[in-house]
């Protein structure tokens, strides 16, 4: 897979044919809002301008999705036929995985190795999994009297608007699209402003795989324009969103101002990695640091808080700092690179600001600093940071969305749980212990939608993903995700 060199990938990137329009009703059209002007974080070079959707463009896309839904060309297909189309779509993605991975690396700085081995594999698997699963989800036949027949059936909700982030641009898209399409909905997808090229190419492959025109429309644009227009549109039935709490709560407001559409928000996290006294400290710290620095720390599940017994605090700082110093950013196009570029200059400045304020608050900076890292000229690179802090420090409470690991000491188990649960978020957590009884007891007291024990970021498509508290509600992945995109219908038939 990795016979190409960094120079080879650079040449392939220069030769890419980049789609820059909106895809509505199976046709490429120009948006009427001010175009997006993306910058590659790899080297700071300007990429082709992307057409952006206005209110009128969003209305056109929603009308296209509604017409496709009402026609029954997709919504009324047998589940097995829809599943076969999704499996064909997955194969198209597989066959074009290198191009899609290159687009991701170009537009948001992910190392090409990770884009290929991790992201594209996840995307293919997601569409294939739902394609194989959809005809195995059964309706219900409640037991009633002999003179009646009761049916509980699941029907597609209608038009789904999917608003996705840039950090795992196609993985997050697949988690929304695959279940929504599997059960028969039509979708309007608004990709993040930083990652529209890959979404547009994905939609082109959907058409090639036989997904009917209008069933999937893609409308790049700005959040306050295209995103708001989708949120307020009275003919959108469901919004599925992954992003910041501030923006996610705007969609709840948009819903209340319009037709009361369902909103499924996944709103970030502040993952605590809790190391109990009996755990293998070095293994736990190294895995936590890797989990914090992966994808340049730009993950809602990044293990950004390491909680250790007070007696182990200094040693934990040393181990984490060693990991940080050996995990430095490099050219995303080099196949040996494990840490690429920060998605934008704005994001880099935001990360640096957290480090500067932590330093001003008296945090112990064990590795890294607030300065940018010189990996590729013109690019946006930031070296991992390890800081010793208290739970009250800003960097220990707020989501940094960058490679900054906070090491926090605790006194006893109750103190540790108070710290772990002491933020607004409740998306994910990790627990490290060799005591099975403690694992059962403590994992149940952690307020998070996902808990990993003696591992990090493990799981497969059978496991639901989502959070509690300020991290939102609803679940991606697994059969439970289908519930977000269907309506239950109760039918009672009196028999003579």
Image (cartoon, grey):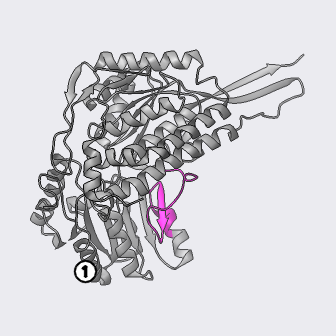
The 10 Å Cα crowd at callout 1, few under 14, some 14 to 19, many 20 or more, is some
Side (left or right) of 316 relative to 24: left
Residue 371 position, x and y percent, is 10, 62
Main secondary structure found in the magenta portion:
loop
Q: Quadrant of residue 210?
A: top right
Q: Is residue 486 left or right of residue 3?
A: right
Q: Is residue 52 magenta?
A: no
SS at mark 1? helix
Magenta segment: 442-465
Q: Nearer the viewer, residue 135 or 112?
A: 112
Q: Is residue 108 visible?
A: no
Q: In the figure, 313 relative to 149: above or below?
A: below
Point out the image quarter for the N terminus: bottom left
Q: Residue at x 38, y 16 (%)?
A: 60
Relative image position of residue 451 (x, y in whole percent) = 48, 61
Residue 61 is situated, as x and y percent measured from the top left of the image, at 40, 20
Residue at 52% over, 59% down: 459
**What is the count of numbered marks?**
1
Between 101 and 134, the residue placed more toward the observer is 101
- For mark 1, what is the residue? 318
In screen coordinates, is 157 left or right of 303?
A: right
Residue 167: image location, x then y, percent: 32, 48
Give the residue at x 24% y 75%.
321
């Amino acid at each position: 897979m990795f016979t190409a060199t960094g120079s080879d990938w650079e040449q392939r990137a220069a030769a890419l044919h980049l789609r820059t329009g909106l895809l509505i009703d199976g046709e490429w059209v120009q948006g009427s809002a001010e175009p997006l002007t993306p910058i590659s974080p790899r080297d700071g070079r300007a990429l082709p301008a992307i057409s952006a959707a206005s209110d009128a463009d969003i209305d056109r896309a929603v009308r296209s999705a509604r017409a496709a839904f009402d026609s029954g060309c997709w919504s009324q297909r047998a589940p097995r036929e829809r599943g076969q189309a999704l499996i064909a779509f997955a194969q198209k993605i597989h066959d074009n995985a290198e191009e899609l991975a290159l687009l991701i690396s170009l537009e948001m700085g992910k190392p090409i190795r990770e884009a290929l081995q991790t992201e594209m594999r996840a995307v293919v698997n997601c569409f294939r999994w739902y394609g194989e699963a959809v005809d195995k989800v059964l309706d219900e036949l409640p037991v009633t009297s002999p003179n009646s027949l009761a049916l509980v059936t699941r029907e597609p909700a209608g038009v789904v608007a999917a608003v996705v982030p840039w950090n795992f641009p196609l993985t997050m898209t697949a988690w929304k699209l695959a279940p929504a399409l599997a059960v028969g909905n039509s979708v309007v997808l608004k990709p993040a402003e930083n990652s529209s090229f890959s979404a547009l190419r994905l939609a082109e492959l959907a058409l090639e795989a036989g997904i009917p025109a209008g069933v999937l429309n893609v409308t790049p644009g700005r959040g306050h324009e295209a995103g708001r227009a989708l949120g307020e549109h009275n003919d959108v039935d469901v919004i599925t969103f992954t992003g910041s709490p501030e923006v996610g709560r705007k969609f709840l407001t948009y819903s209340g101002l319009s037709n009361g559409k369902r909103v499924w928000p996944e709103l970030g996290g502040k993952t605590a990695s809790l190391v109990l006294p009996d755990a293998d400290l070095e293994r736990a710290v190294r895995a936590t640091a890797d989990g914090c620095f992966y994808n340049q720390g730009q993950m809602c599940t990044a293990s950004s808080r390491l909680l250790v017994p007070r007696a182990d605090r200094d040693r934990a700082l040393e181990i984490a700092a060693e990991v940080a110093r050996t995990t430095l950013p490099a050219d995303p196009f080099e196949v040996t690179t494990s840490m690429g570029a920060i998605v934008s200059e704005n994001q880099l400045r935001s990360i640096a600001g957290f480090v500067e304020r932590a330093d001003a608050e008296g945090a112990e900076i064990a590795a890294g600093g607030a300065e940018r890292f010189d990996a590729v000229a013109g690019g946006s690179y930031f070296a991992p940071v390890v800081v010793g802090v208290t739970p009250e420090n800003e960097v220990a409470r707020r989501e940094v969305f960058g490679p900054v690991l906070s090491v926090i000491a605790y006194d006893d188990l109750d103190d540790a749980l108070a710290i772990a649960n002491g933020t607004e978020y409740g998306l994910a957590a990790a627990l490290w212990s060799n005591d099975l009884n403690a694992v059962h007891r403590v994992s149940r007291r952690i307020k998070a939608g996902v808990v990993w024990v003696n591992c990090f970021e493990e799981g497969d498509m059978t496991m639901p993903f989502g959070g509690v508290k300020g991290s939102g509600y609803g679940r991606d992945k697994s059969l439970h995700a289908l519930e977000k995109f269907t309506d239950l219908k109760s039918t009672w038939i009196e028999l003579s």
